[in-house]
Image (cartoon, rainbow, N blue to C red):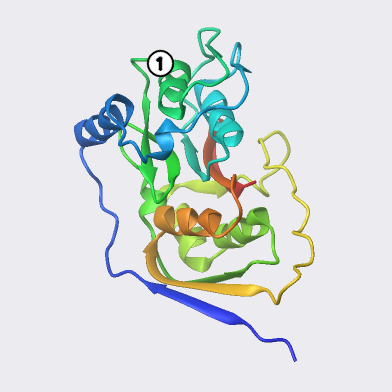
Amino acid sequence: MTHFEIVVKHSDSTLRFVPAVLFLALGMASAQAPSPESVMNRRVPRALDAGDQSQLYAAHGVLLEAGLSGGVVDLGDVGPTADAAVPEGTTVSEALTQVLGGRTKYYWREIGGGVDILPQKGIPPLLVTNIPFYEWRSDESPYSAVERLQQLPEVTRRMSQLGYVDGLHHGPGLQKAPRVAASPEPLQPPRTYVRRNMALLDLLNEIVKSYPPPAIWSYQEVVQDQVRAVTISAR
């Protein structure tokens, strides 16, 4: 008989907007003085060439190479990097400073052993949406767990209120997240995770943290034909 281990985490806190200046201060603090045990001091094991890549794509690559989980919010407002190259052995903090640049529109924050890349002008309102209940299993891929999350009534209703359409399923031409194969059959019974009353942003971080790193979620806004589409995905 198959049995499941239920892990429940309850959070009564609701994510609220914080002035952009505070976001910037947090990102600068992370870049300037990470604590000795901080994941920002982890070394990137091989050189990265970020030439002609967007700043956020390059930052995503830094997290992958460093074996870190986390997330990236892309509002579609950044261009390519200035041919930034990250030498082998560079710390994550130094690498992100290099690829994001000194006057970037984005900053990073360390959260629970992972790293989020967020816009300085504030967290998108969709990511503040409260999710009363969500569960996922260890035998489904991060992509599957996050794709189902975007289809929740609370999320689709809020998207409609904000004038967004679903970028995963809205017509040709919009950038779609890659399909990811299901996780291999576990040696032990699958684990079921349950979270209650969490902001969508916090829940995304909880999901990727439940998988072996690197597992990274992404939030992307794309405008095409005067339609703003949102895709929330993970890999």
Would residue 166 be found to the left or right of residue 128 on screen? right
* In the foreground, 58 or 66: 66
The relative height of residue 162 versus residue 120 in the rendered view (above or below) is below
The relative height of residue 40 versus residue 48 in the rendered view (above or below) is below
> Which residue is identified by label 1?
101
Q: Quadrant of the N terminus?
A: bottom right
Q: Label 1: few (<14), some or many (≥20) within 10 Å? A: some
Q: State the image quarter where residue 137 is shown.
A: bottom right
Q: Residue at x 38, y 58 (%)?
A: 129
Count of numbered badges drawn on the protein: 1
Residue 44 in the image: x percent, y percent? 55, 27
The relative height of residue 21 versus residue 5 in the rendered view (above or below) is above
In this view, the residue farthest toward the front is 36
Would residue 209 be found to the left or right of residue 174 on screen? left
Q: Which residue is drawn at 33% across and 15% down?
A: 103
Residue 108 in the image: x percent, y percent? 38, 34
Query: Does residue 162 appear in the picture of this structure?
Result: yes
| Label 1 residue SS | loop
* In the foreground, 151 or 234: 234
Residue 205 in the image: x percent, y percent? 46, 53
Would residue 188 be found to the left or right of residue 191 on screen? right
* In the foreground, 185 or 228: 185
Q: Which residue is drawn at 40% across and 56% down?
A: 202
Would residue 157 be found to the left or right of residue 137 on screen? left
Amino acid type, mark 1: Gly
Q: State the image quarter where residue 18 is shown.
A: top left
In this view, the residue farthest toward the top is 83
Q: Which residue is drawn at 41% across and 34% down?
A: 40
Query: Does residue 225 appear in the picture of this structure?
Result: no
Residue 77 in the image: x percent, y percent? 46, 24
